[in-house]
Amino acid sequence: MIKSKIRQYWNQYSTRVIHLDQFALAKMGLVQSRTILKIDNYMIICAPYQISMRKAFLFSVLNRDEIPFFYNYINKLASLKLTFQKTLKGIPVKFFVWVMMKGISPIKGKENMCLIEVDYKSCPESLINIIGEFITVQKAFEDYYEQLKDKQIYINRNTSRALKYNNFIECFIGNRKIEAKLLSLSVACLHIEFPGTDPLLIEGFEFKSKLYFQSYRFYVKGKIEKTEKTMEGFLKVTYAIQYIPELVDIIQDYFSNEQTQTTLF
């Protein structure tokens, strides 16, 4: 059964490349700080940038003399240590993967930062399983998004506690950072109250915000669909946002817990 699932994951997802943002790292349990590439007798501390069942792209800090030195190891064998925090007991799982060095290049505008590309000689079955399970979660979250996009949660003391929301949102308007108030949210839309009117805050204006939860802190991008002035001089904004898996995770968990509590009582 397990072998069959591994084969299925490989056949479906072996070419799928995962960008390792905070959501992917959290769900996969990948510990970035414990990634090491061993080339000959040299140990290079890396931060995984992208990963698949066939290859990985890694960030590393090397000085201008080290980068050309490691060019000599292109198309030569190396080993990659990846660490995952996946077990219930909190014991990390380590993989040592034989890899072929395929490329190393400096990153423009980032001093001493480089990108290393490696191909696996073979992918451990446990790693195939971790990656396959994560891609399955990704697909499930896309379904959750469609189910939840019209469900608004109004922010109050109880919902903030249930969402583990830190009651803090920053909005980046032009060159300014404004602390606003989140009135309600869904996976597709936020309702935000600004402390006063602003000539930039009109329908169609696009801006970036940062939301603070206990589980995640993340940026969202979106645009204003509607504005409304209040009697107190505040400005209420309906803000349509792009798909954010971290927010889907938080809201799906909120409704799952709400359903569980309703069932219990």
Image: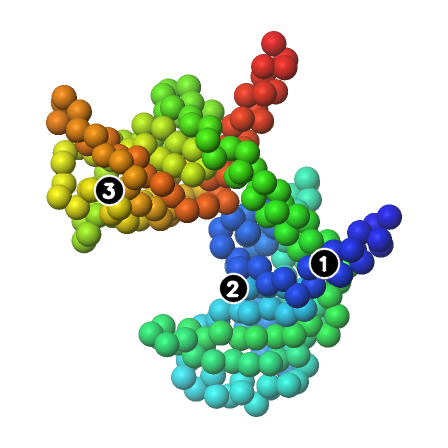
Mark 2 falls on what kind of element? strand
- Location of mark 1 (residue): 12
Q: Residue at x 55, y 64 (%)?
A: 50
44 to 249, vertically: above or below: below
Q: Residue at horizontal 47%, vertical 80%?
A: 105
Left or right for 240, reference 176: right
* Amino acid type indicated by mark 3: Glu
Q: Quadrant of residue 212?
A: top left
Q: Position of residue 145 (x, y in %)?
A: 52, 39
Query: What secondary structure is marked by label 1?
Result: helix
Q: Is residue 113 above or below residue 91?
A: below
Q: Which residue is mark 3?
A: 203
Residue 70 lies, in percent from the top left, at 54, 85
Determine contact: label 3, label 2, CB under 8 Å. no
- State the residue in front, 117 or 18: 18
Identify the residue at horizontal 65%, vertical 74% (top origin): 119
| Image depth: mark 3 or mark 2 in front | 3
**Position of residue 169 in the picture relative to residue 246 (left or right):** left
| Disc 3 from disc 1: Cα separation | 42 Å
| Amino acid identity at mark 2 | Tyr
Residue 49: mark in rendering:
2
Q: CA distance from mark 1 to mark 2?
A: 22 Å
Q: Quadrant of residue 182?
A: top left
Residues under numbered marks 1 and 2 in contact, where contact means CB atoms less than 8 Å apart: no
